[in-house]
């Protein structure tokens, strides 16, 4: 794709990077076939190729219309288009650069969207505020309008007893995640129980900062970078004390794996980010090295976009579940987003609900006893659309493990 960058933008490193990404696109349109918003809306500008043109126009005109911003806002950032693209176009990175430029131009969303975004950014990363609000929400849910109640997750009271590891064979630092530690803290407890069977000890950070994912995907890149640096400051001193850093929420994991790219202009933090990412693994990459013997069950697995498209981890969870004794159903259109996509379900409720209905229909089509997933956002979103129990796949292993300790 030929480009003529606006003279005011020429020479800026991120614009050069965007230009390079644009030049890789050969307009073939293969990506549109796997784009969830294009499939639903049928408008070229609500598909990746159209959005790439909109960002190209932004770089050439150094301006963008409100209508174009709406098309870009409707993108789920699921990155299914990256998986499909034969030319390796890094669409997610291009969109990030475009959003940075839009933020510079002070392009403001409408008032209601602005209020919702501000509220989410203020509340979600603050456990002391978010936790009590969610707990209060459990009581007032019956009084809420259905459209609002749908977004109020049911908090789990499940807990696991974690066996004591007398002689540790390994030590890992497990990240807790802002939403997961409030809504489904049992996921990391379940992981600690599983790892105890392998004599591996789990450590956590005392007051873990937000990874910055929420701010970053809402276009607040400066705040996001501050949060990222704060989390790096917390993890870095622990780096040499653990064998691995583990993320059990693929949405947080994919953002942290992108830290070196996001912080590439910051010499000090870029270097630290590189070292952290070298030790960071998704929980599936860690548990694939062990074997577990579980009571069988019939499971439909929903691989989050942040796992399959963002981290390019495919088939690993499925392999672990099969090796542990579970039966997997066949899920059609497994590459498509469930509509959760961070805050998308709140900011674009209509599209999100349509994607949810389609996704749940495919997940329950073969009578699964459980729907398993790997990210807190998908977990809560999917559960709002079905009575089939939705769990993090780590919970399934922990729930149905036949032997409680490695020595048993
Ligand atoms: S598949 Fe890749 S090269 Fe083809 S239009 Fe989409 S982004 Fe461009
Ligand atoms: S990230 Fe997802 S929604 Fe956005 S253009 Fe790509 S495939 Fe479509």
Image (spheres, grey):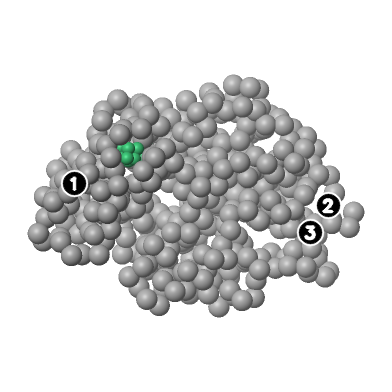
The numbered mark at residue 282 is: none
The image quadrant where one finds the C terminus is: bottom right
- For the residues labelled 2 and 1, the Cα–Cα distance comes to 60 Å
Along the horizontal axis of the image, is 161 left or right of 59?
right
Pointer 3 local density, CA inside 10 Å: few below 14, some 14–19, many at least 20: some
Seen in the picture, residue 321 relative to 9 is either above or below; the reply is above
Seen in the picture, residue 284 relative to 344 is either above or below; the reply is below
Q: CB of mark 2 within 8 Å of CB of mark 1?
A: no
Query: Is residue 209 at all visible to an observer of this figure?
Result: yes
Residue lying at 63% horizontally and 53% vertically, measured from the top left: 285
Pointer 1 local density, CA inside 10 Å: few below 14, some 14–19, many at least 20: few
Instruction: Where is residue 64? Give x, y as percent.
Output: 15, 46
Seen in the picture, residue 272 relative to 323 is either above or below; the reply is below
SS category of the residue bearing label 2 = loop
The answer to which of 403 and 78 lies nearer the viewer is: 78
Pointer 2 local density, CA inside 10 Å: few below 14, some 14–19, many at least 20: some
Q: Which residue is mark 1?
A: 2
The answer to which of 360 and 114 lies nearer the viewer is: 360
Q: Which residue is mark 2?
A: 404
SS category of the residue bearing label 1 = loop
Seen in the picture, residue 57 relative to 349 is either above or below; the reply is below
Instruction: Where is residue 339? Give x, y as percent.
Output: 43, 36
- For the residues labelled 1 and 3, the Cα–Cα distance comes to 55 Å
Mark 2 or mark 1, whichever is nearer to me: 1
Q: Which residue is mark 3?
A: 198
Q: Pick whichever of labels 1 and 3 is earlier in the sequence.
A: 1
SS category of the residue bearing label 3 = loop
């Amino acid at each position: 794709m030929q480009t003529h960058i606006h003279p005011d933008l020429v020479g800026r490193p991120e614009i050069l990077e965007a230009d390079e990404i644009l030049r890789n696109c050969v307009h073939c349109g293969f990506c549109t076939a796997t784009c969830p918003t294009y499939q639903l809306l049928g408008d070229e500008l609500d598909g990746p190729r159209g959005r790439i043109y909109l960002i190209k126009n932004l770089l050439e005109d150094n301006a963008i219309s409100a209508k174009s911003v709406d098309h870009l806002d409707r993108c789920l950032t699921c990155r299914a288009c990256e998986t499909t693209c034969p030319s390796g176009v890094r669409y997610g990175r291009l969109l990030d650069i475009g959003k940075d430029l839009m933020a510079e131009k002070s392009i403001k969303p409408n008032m209601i969207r602005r209020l919702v975004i501000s509220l989410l950014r203020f509340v979600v990363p603050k456990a002391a505020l978010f936790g009590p609000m969610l707990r209060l929400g459990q009581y007032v849910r019956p009084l809420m309008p259905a459209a609002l109640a749908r977004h109020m997750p049911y908090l789990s009271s499940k807990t696991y007893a974690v066996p004591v590891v007398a002689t540790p064979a390994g030590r890992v630092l497990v990240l807790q995640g802002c939403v997961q530690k409030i809504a489904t803290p049992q996921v990391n407890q379940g992981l600690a129980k599983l790892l105890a069977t392998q004599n591996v000890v789990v450590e956590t950070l005392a007051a873990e900062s937000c990874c910055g994912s929420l701010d970053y995907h809402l276009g607040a890149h400066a705040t996001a970078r501050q949060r990222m640096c704060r989390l790096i400051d917390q993890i870095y001193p622990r780096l040499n004390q653990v064998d691995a850093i583990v993320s059990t929420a693929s949405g947080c994991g994919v953002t942290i794996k992108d830290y070196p790219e996001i912080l590439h202009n910051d010499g000090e933090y870029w270097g630290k980010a590189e070292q952290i990412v070298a030790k960071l693994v998704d929980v599936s990459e860690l548990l694939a090295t062990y074997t577990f013997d579980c009571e069988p069950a019939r499971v439909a697995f929903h691989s989050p976009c942040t796992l399959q498209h963002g981290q390019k981890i495919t088939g690993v969870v499925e392999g672990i579940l099969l090796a542990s004794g579970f039966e997997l159903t066949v899920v059609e259109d497994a590459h498509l987003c469930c509509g959760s996509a961070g805050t998308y379900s709140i900011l674009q409720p209509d599209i999100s609900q349509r994607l949810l209905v389609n996704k749940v229909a495919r997940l329950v089509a073969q009578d699964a006893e459980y729907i398993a997933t790997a990210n807190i956002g998908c977990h809560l979103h999917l559960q709002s659309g079905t009575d089939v129990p939705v769990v993090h796949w780590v919970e399934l292993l922990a729930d149905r493990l036949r032997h409680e300790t490695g020595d048993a």
